[in-house]
């Protein structure tokens, strides 16, 4: 996912996790002039640091060495060259020769800065800076953003199943209650204003503080006091595993033809199972054609897109290709037979990554009609790396090509039928005003 889309994603997740809902695993989701004297002092400092280069450096703590090793690896990948190694510190840890200047500067800053220093923040900033020097999809995620991101891609979290926000008075207010969640079972509703959690008054409390109250209450019954229509109520609820729904389905009748519709919002780890379940339900209703709506779907797991595509194509069909270090490998469908359904895929400028893999494979291998706007154009694959302190970073490691070998990066997929979303729909978002959906229905009903 791109930084722009990821930022939008993280904002959605933070709102959702407001969903935080009392989410026990989330801490709250998808980057001057100097005078002559100062110049002389800087020069003296540089000379002093060079002088100290071969002297005994301050010993790093294990966590600091771990972070520096990560930095070492990334610098190695970035520079793409071989290095000579030499030992530093009392424990004889090995670092790259070209990294020694960084280590010397790090020691100098830590030992000489006139103020307090958060070493973790210093090293996080160094790692983030290196990733920022690469492509826009290689990004650093601090522990909070990483937890949000995990919720988003894992497709679930532990909580009571409510989406919350601070109302105009600054009070915790329920925006939505998830179906079949603990909150729905005890009768909580959208609009309820929570004023107490146990004996703790939560009036005016922000969302992060509210969530932290429940981190200590894992698997315990929590009493909530809330206001509804001016009256005070109390209820008790226990957190449980909440699955986030990323697939919705329905049927349309157009010109006496039954057309199935599947909306996919993200390619999370549980999206394939949800898609398969909803697709099977549509097939039992004897649909003749199918619309897959990927608008505003910024991507997710490559394997999820691959598994969904395999529901429509036999194993003789390639789905995508992976290009790494001048070697290209084709990846084929795992399906047993080709679909007989005529398929239309609706996309827009925010359909990216895994969405583009599914759309391109169905277009090139199943003759699907692509309707809407040119997609985002993300033709790279990122791998997630976990750091011991809970932070993560994503590093671009490969390019992906469509099944026919087209690299869509920064270009996107051009729709078969180009349709921009109407202003009427933006003002009044109803199905009848959704001209992209209506175009798909018209094309499939011919």
Image (tube, rainbow, N blue to C red):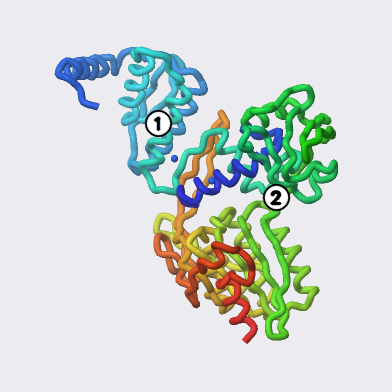
Q: Quadrant of the C terminus?
A: bottom right
Marks 2, 1: nearer the viewer: 2
Which residue is disc 1 drawn over?
126
Question: Residue lying farthest left?
Answer: 36
Disc 2 packing (10 Å; few <14; some 14–19; many ≥20) = many
Tell me what residue is drawn at x 52 percent, y 75 percent: 364
Few, some or many residues within 10 Å of mark 1 (<14, 14–19, 20+): some
Q: Residue at x 46, y 17 (%)?
A: 91
Query: What residue is shown with label 2?
Result: 244
* Residue 17 position by quadrant: top right
Residue 175: horizontal and vertical position, in percent?
68, 45
Question: Could you tell me which secondary element the residue under label 2 belongs to?
Answer: loop
Judging depth in this view, the residue of 197 and 151 nearest the camera is 197
In the image, taking residue 41 as reference, residue 340 lies left or right, namely: right
Residue 365, percent across and down?
56, 75
Pointer 2 or 1: first along the chain: 1
- Measured in 3D between alpha carbons, the distance from the residue under mark 2 to the one under mark 1, in whole angstroms, is 35 Å
Is 428 located above or below residue 384 in the figure?
below
| Image position, residue 82 (x, y; %) | 34, 39
Query: Residue 16: horizontal and vertical position, in percent?
Result: 64, 44
- Is 64 drawn above or below residue 275 in the view shown? above
Q: Is residue 190 above or below residue 89?
A: below
Res 83 → quadrant = top left
């Amino acid at each position: 996912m791109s930084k722009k889309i990821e930022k939008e994603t993280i904002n959605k997740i933070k709102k959702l996790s407001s969903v935080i809902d009392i989410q026990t695993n989330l801490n709250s989701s998808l980057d001057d002039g100097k005078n002559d004297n100062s110049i002389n002092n800087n020069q003296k400092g540089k000379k002093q640091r060079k002088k100290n280069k071969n002297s005994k450096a301050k010993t790093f703590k294990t966590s600091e060495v771990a972070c520096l090793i990560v930095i070492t690896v990334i610098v190695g990948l970035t520079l793409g060259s071989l290095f000579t190694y030499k030992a530093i510190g009392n424990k004889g840890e090995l670092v790259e020769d070209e990294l020694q200047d960084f280590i010397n500067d790090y020691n100098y800053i830590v030992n000489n800065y006139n103020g307090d220093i958060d070493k973790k923040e210093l090293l996080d900033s160094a790692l983030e800076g290196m990733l920022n020097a690469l492509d826009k999809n290689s990004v650093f995620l601090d522990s909070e953003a990483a937890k949000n991101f995990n919720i988003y891609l894992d497709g679930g979290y532990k909580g009571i199943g409510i989406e919350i926000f601070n109302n105009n008075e600054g009070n915790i207010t329920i925006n939505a209650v998830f179906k079949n969640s603990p909150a729905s079972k005890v009768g909580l509703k959208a609009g309820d204003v929570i004023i107490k959690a146990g004996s703790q008054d939560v009036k005016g409390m922000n969302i992060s503080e509210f969530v932290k109250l429940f981190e200590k209450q894992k698997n315990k019954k929590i009493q909530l006091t809330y206001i509804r229509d001016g009256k005070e109520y109390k209820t008790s609820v226990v957190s449980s595993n909440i699955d986030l729904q990323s697939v919705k389905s329905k049927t349309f009748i157009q010109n006496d033809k039954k057309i199935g519709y599947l909306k996919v919002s993200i390619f999370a780890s549980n999206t394939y199972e949800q898609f398969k379940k909803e697709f099977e339900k549509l097939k039992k209703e004897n649909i003749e054609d199918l619309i897959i709506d990927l608008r505003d779907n910024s991507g997710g797991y490559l394997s999820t897109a691959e598994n969904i595509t395999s529901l429509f194509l036999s194993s003789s069909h390639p789905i995508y290709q992976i290009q790494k270090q001048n070697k290209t490998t084709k990846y084929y469908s795992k399906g047993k037979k080709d679909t007989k359904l005529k398929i239309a895929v609706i996309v827009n400028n925010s359909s990216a990554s895994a969405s583009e893999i599914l759309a391109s494979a169905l277009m090139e291998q199943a003759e699907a009609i692509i309707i809407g706007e040119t997609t985002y154009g993300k033709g790279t694959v990122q791998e997630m790396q976990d750091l011991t302190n809970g932070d993560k970073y994503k590093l671009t490691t490969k390019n992906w090509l469509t099944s026919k070998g087209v690299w869509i990066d920064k270009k996107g997929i051009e729709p078969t039928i180009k349709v921009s979303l109407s202003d009427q729909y933006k003002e009044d978002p109803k199905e009848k005003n959704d001209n992209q959906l209506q175009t798909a229905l018209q094309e499939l009903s011919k």
